[in-house]
Amino acid sequence: MNNELIGLLRSNLGMPLSAELAADIMLAADRIPALIACDAVHRIKPERYGDFVFSLELIEVIANDIKPLHKAHWDETEGHRHGLPLDPDYPAFIRYEQAGRYVLLTLRMGDRLLGNCAMYLDKSTHTQTIIATEDTLYLLPEARKGRVARQFVAYVERRHAPTRRPRNSYHRKNSQQGRAVLQDARLPPCRKWIDENTGG
């Protein structure tokens, strides 16, 4: 619930609508209510695996770095969606991130971004615990060698959210390209699995 918007409307009931009040209402209406405090999210620490570094990064800061990775992901695994252009809403990602509802974990070698896992955070309507749903999980082919992909996914599962061991939900692509990505990464070849271990 957007308590800021509700409070603003309540405190101005019966008042004439001025340009300033209209602007305040528009700004408050566009804000997504916070779920997890930003300082809690920023407690996620980076980890090294060989020459690779896994870490939390802000999409607001690395938007220019991640756009080519999103394009590579789309080109490799979404080719079956003919007629649908890649059109990410980066301002929406940023709003969710600022509200503690979007976490971006990355895989780098030096300064080069080689992979990412973005998770949406929400509260389960069944248990009121925090849940994390994968929006994107992608590694460039050079990051799928050896055990790098497995180690990155393990990092995501350990570090993706700062509260009460949420449950992860991952979605696998059921296209030829998607299966090839999973085989290269040595991840389980299933369409969807839920990691029960993070649930406690």
Image (cartoon, helix red, strand yellow):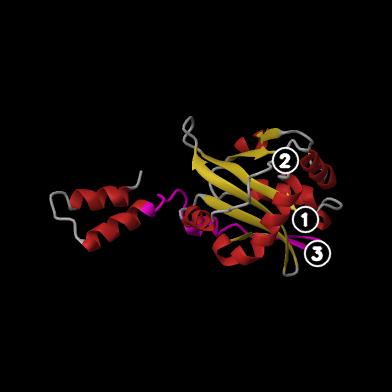
| Rendered location of residue 134, percent (x, y) | 62, 44
Q: Which mark is residue 140?
A: 1
Horizontally, is 92 left or right of 188 in the view? left
Dot 2 or dot 1, earlier in sequence: 2
Drawn side of residue 179 relative to residue 32, left or right: right
Would residue 46 be seen by someone viewing this image from the given angle? no
Badge 1 marks a residue whose secondary structure is loop
- Which kind of residue does numbered mark 2 sit on? His
If you read the primary sequence from the N terminus, does the residue marked by circle 2 or circle 3 appear first? 3
Cα–Cα span, label 2 and label 3: 34 Å
Q: How many C-alpha atoms fall within 10 Å of the one at disc 3: few (<14), some, or many (≥20)?
A: few
Q: Is residue 104 magenta?
A: no
x then y, percent, for residue 125: 46, 32
Residues at marks 1 and 3, CA–CA distance in whole angstroms: 15 Å
Residue extending farthest top: 126
Q: Which mark is residue 80?
A: 2
In the image, what residue occupies the spot 72% across and 33% down?
191
Extreme residue toward the front, this view: 83
Mark positioned earlier in the residue sequence (1 or 3): 3
**Pointer 3: what residue?**
51
Residue type beneath disc 1: Leu
Q: Quadrant of the N terminus?
A: top left
Q: Secondary structure at mark 2?
A: loop
Q: Point out the stretch of residues depicted in magenta.
A: 30-54
- Eye-nearest disc, 2 or 3: 2
